[in-house]
């Protein structure tokens, strides 16, 4: 089940003090997780590193797939890089998957199929594995820091694209599925940038409900997680970590797809999200597919075709 920046090349030293929402300077070390709030991540921006291209995994007539890696917050993150044949400059799509069990995950799961279609049509795609997956370093032990580091990883990947000579840094978009859709929306808000973004059944409920909703699948029905959440709320304002509180920061054109037969992200969630986006006058195309499930089975070709046309028009 798939649950789980103007170009923002503003690089901020990791030890730089940040402006709090109240306008006072505060060090992120005062409360360890405060640096991950949306207002503070907006001040931080992305921190670049060199994207390293590894071994070729697959060669097709129009593209080649490689492993890649980069650094975020001192940790290595790996992923799948698809490069079209030719010298560049190619537009770039950052692809963000939904939740996958670590025990069955391999690089490319959740993004590879769509990524290959985009690469065949002249787009570089970058799909990070995230910490704890494939060849990436392990995440911190804190369950909330592990979660908050996902948007940070994407911010830093975004800032690192300039290290790819074959990439057109003026043409960058996002593709996100399920929890990856929420991460994409979070990054769009934090950056305030207009990166064209396609979303498949994005998780769109506020934090922490977006996690608690799925705890019936845990062995303890979420008892331990609720205890950790209670501890978190003693020191932090959860609203500062919830993307739904910052929808008015969005500037990007969006294309959203939702299957009526989706049993992981309810149709009502996406309808409510689109209603709010339209109220804010966000440029959004919304498509609903009567027989499609969470992975768009039954309508996959149509959905990908629409996304390809969307990126061709917007990038």
Image (spheres, helix red, strand yellow):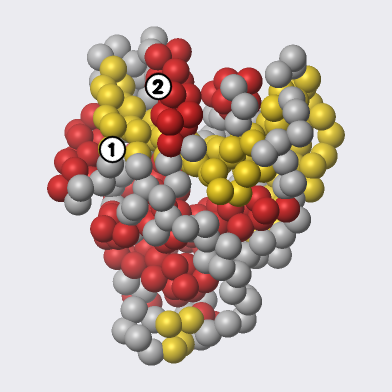
**Horizontal and vertical percent for residue 49?**
72, 59
The residue lying at 48 percent from left, 81 percent from top is 18
Give left or right: position of 31 versus 236: right
Please tell me how many numbered marks the rendered image carries. Answer: 2
Q: Quadrant of the N terminus?
A: top left
The label number, if any, that marks residue 306 in the structure image: 2
The residue lying at 51 percent from left, 76 percent from top is 32
How far apart, in angstroms, are the residues tagged by discs 1 and 2?
13 Å
**Horizontal and vertical percent for residue 77?**
69, 50
Say whether residue 10 is visible. Answer: yes
Give left or right: position of 238 versus 44: left
**Horizontal and vertical percent for residue 21?**
34, 79
Where, by quadrant of the figure, is residue 121 drawn?
Answer: top right
Q: Which residue is identified by label 1?
A: 284
- Front one among 40 and 29: 40
Label 2, secondary structure: give it: helix
């Amino acid at each position: 089940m798939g649950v789980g920046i103007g170009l923002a090349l503003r690089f901020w030293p990791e030890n730089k003090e940040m402006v709090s929402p109240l306008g006072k300077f505060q060090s992120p070390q005062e409360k360890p997780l405060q640096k991950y709030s949306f207002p503070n991540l907006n001040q931080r921006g992305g921190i670049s590193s060199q994207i390293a291209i590894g071994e070729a995994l697959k060669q097709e007539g129009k593209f080649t797939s490689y492993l890649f890696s980069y650094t975020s917050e001192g940790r290595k993150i790996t992923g799948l890089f698809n490069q079209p044949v030719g010298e560049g400059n190619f537009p770039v799509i950052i692809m963000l998957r939904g939740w996958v069990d670590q025990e069955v995950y391999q690089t490319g799961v959740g993004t590879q199929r769509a990524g290959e279609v985009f690469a065949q049509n002249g787009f570089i795609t970058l799909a990070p594995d995230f910490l704890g997956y494939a060849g990436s370093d392990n995440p911190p032990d804190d369950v909330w820091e592990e979660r908050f580091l996902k948007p940070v990883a994407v911010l830093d990947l975004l800032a690192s694209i300039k290290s790819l000579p074959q990439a057109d840094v003026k043409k960058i978009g996002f593709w996100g599925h399920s929890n990856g859709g929420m991460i994409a929306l979070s990054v769009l808000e934090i950056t305030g940038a207009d990166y064209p973004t396609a979303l498949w059944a994005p998780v769109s409920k506020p934090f922490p409900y977006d996690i608690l909703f799925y705890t019936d699948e845990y062995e303890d029905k979420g008892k331990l997680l609720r205890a950790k959440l209670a501890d978190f709320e003693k020191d932090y304002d959860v609203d500062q970590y919830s993307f739904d509180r910052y929808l008015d920061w969005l500037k990007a054109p969006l294309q959203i797809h939702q299957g009526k037969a989706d049993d992981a992200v309810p149709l009502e969630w996406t309808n409510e999200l689109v209603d709010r986006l339209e109220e804010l006058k966000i440029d959004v195309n919304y498509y609903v597919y009567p027989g499609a499930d969470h992975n768009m089975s039954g309508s996959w070709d149509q959905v990908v075709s629409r996304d390809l046309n969307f990126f061709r028009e917007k990038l």
